[in-house]
């Protein structure tokens, strides 16, 4: 079934269907990260480069952040379901993710994290 046929059958415009798909896809990424953090905090801590630079492993703290990511993922799911509420729902997710990113930048600027650590950068071999 093509996108246009799906849109005609469901009464959605293809644009609304694309929005739902992209929002749901982003939400799935947040959901996968949240599940990893909640189910295996030590595995997550070791798997994400740069995380050990932030301090010693604390399973409760990793799960706390996992719950925040789960909340963002569920908000994205609600957005995909109810597009008419996209503006306020996406604002809440954007505020959380934006403030989280700013916290990391602040920690680098304050010298609490090394500035040469970049997300997804290859590890240096000594």
Image (tube, grey):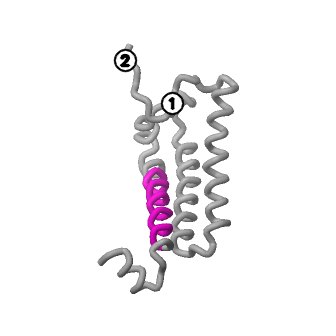
Question: Circle 1 — which element?
Answer: loop
The magenta segment is 17-35
In the orientation shown, which residue stands out farthest toward the top?
126
Report x, y in % for residue 46.
42, 35
The structure residue drawn at horizontal position 57% and vertical position 73%, both measured from the top left corner, is 83
Check residue 16 in the rendering and tell me which mark sits there, or answer none: none
Question: Circle 2 — which element?
Answer: loop
Q: Is residue 74 above or below residue 116?
A: below
Mark 1 vs mark 2: give the one in front.
1
Q: Residues within 10 Å of mark 1 (few under 14, many from 20)?
A: few
Report x, y in % for residue 21.
44, 66
Q: Main secondary structure of the magenta part?
A: helix
Check residue 118 in the rendering and tell me which mark sits there, or answer none: 1
Going from the N terminus, do you reach mark 1 or mark 2 first? 1
Label count reads 2
Identify the residue position indicated by label 2 in the image.
Answer: 125
Q: Quadrant of residue 89?
A: bottom right
The structure residue drawn at horizontal position 42% and vertical position 46%, both measured from the top left corner, is 40
Residue in the foreground of this view, choosing between 100 and 51: 100
């Amino acid at each position: 079934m093509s996108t246009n046929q799906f849109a005609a059958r469901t009464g959605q415009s293809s644009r609304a269907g694309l929005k739902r798909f992209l929002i749901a896809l982003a939400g799935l990424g947040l959901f996968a990260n949240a599940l990893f953090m909640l189910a295996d905090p030590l595995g997550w801590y070791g798997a994400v480069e740069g995380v050990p630079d932030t301090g010693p492993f604390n399973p409760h703290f990793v799960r706390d952040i996992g719950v925040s990511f789960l909340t963002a993922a569920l908000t994205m799911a609600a957005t995909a379901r109810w597009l008419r509420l996209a503006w306020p729902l996406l604002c809440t997710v954007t505020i959380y993710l934006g403030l989280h990113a700013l916290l990391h930048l602040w920690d680098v600027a304050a010298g609490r994290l090394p500035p040469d650590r970049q997300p997804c950068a290859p590890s240096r071999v000594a």
